[in-house]
Amino acid sequence: MDIILGIRVADGTIIATSKAATRGISVLKDTDDKTRPLNARNLIAYTGESGDTVQFAEYIQANVQLYSMRENDIELSPKATASFVRNQLASSLRSRKPYQVNVLIGGYDVKTDTPSLNWIDYLGTQVELPYGAHGYAAFYATSLLDKHYRKDMKVDDGLALLKLCLKELETRMPIDFKGVYVKVVNKDGIKEIEGY
C-alpha cells in the first residue's frame, strides 16, 4: 500500500512518499520515511518488500558516499547514480536472492543545471521521466499527471499538482496512508516541505 510520487519541474524535482508502513491490511507505523539522501543533490525513494527496501537503500547510500570519499568529494550526477542503481538491481535479479525494490531517484545536476527524475523497477528497467509513480499511486495519479503536467512548471506549480494527486488518492484509496513526506531536490540541495 505504499505511495511513491515524483514530479520533475523546471527548477527541481519533487518526491512524495506515504508515511504508513503496512503489512497486508495492517498499518505498522505511521511515520515511515521511504527516502534516503544519497548525496547533497540525489534522493532515492523506494517501495517493495520491507526488508529488501531498507537494506537496498542503505547499500546504495553507502556506496554512493564511498564513491564520493574515494574521488575527493566528487559527487555522482543523477544520471550516474541512476545507472549505478539500475546495474545493482539488474545484477541482483540474476542472483539467488533478488531485491524486490522499485525506486524513484530525484536529483539535480549542477554541471548542466537541470533536474532529473529516474524511474527504476525491480527488473532493472530504468527511464528518465517528467513524472512517475510506484505502488498504488500509479493507478490513481498517472492520469492526473498526464492531464495537468507542463514542462514549464515551477516548484510551487508542482506542489499544487501534487496536492491534486493526493486529494484523488485520499478519495479513491481504500486505506489511509497517513499523509506523505514531501521533499524537493534543487540546486540548493534536499529540502523537506512541511504541511502534507
Image (cartoon, rainbow, N blue to C red):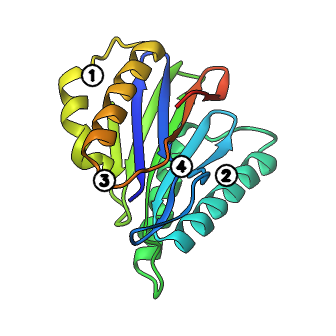
Alpha carbon separation for disc pair 2 and 4: 25 Å
Comes first in the chain, label 2 or label 1: 2
Comes first in the chain, label 2 or label 4: 4
On the image, which quarter does residue 110 sit in?
top right
Alpha carbon separation for disc pair 1 and 3: 19 Å
Comes first in the chain, label 1 or label 3: 3
User: Is the residue 79 above or below the residue 154 in the image?
Assistant: below
Residue 179 drawn at (x, y percent): 49, 42
Residue 81 or residue 141, whichever sits in front: 141
Instruction: Classify mark 4: residues with Cα within 10 Å, few (<14), some (14-19) or many (20+).
Output: many
Residue corresponding to mark 4: 19
Looking at the image, residue 176 sits to the left or right of residue 27; the answer is: left
- Total labels drawn: 4
Say what secondary structure mark 3 lies in: loop
Comes first in the chain, label 1 or label 4: 4
Residue 129 in view: no
Amino acid carrying label 3: it is Tyr
Amino acid carrying label 4: it is Lys
Amino acid carrying label 1: it is Tyr
**Discs 1/3, front:** 3
Residue corresponding to mark 1: 149
Residue corresponding to mark 3: 136
Alpha carbon separation for disc pair 3 and 4: 14 Å
Say what secondary structure mark 1 lies in: loop
User: Is the residue 70 above or below the residue 76 in the image?
Assistant: below
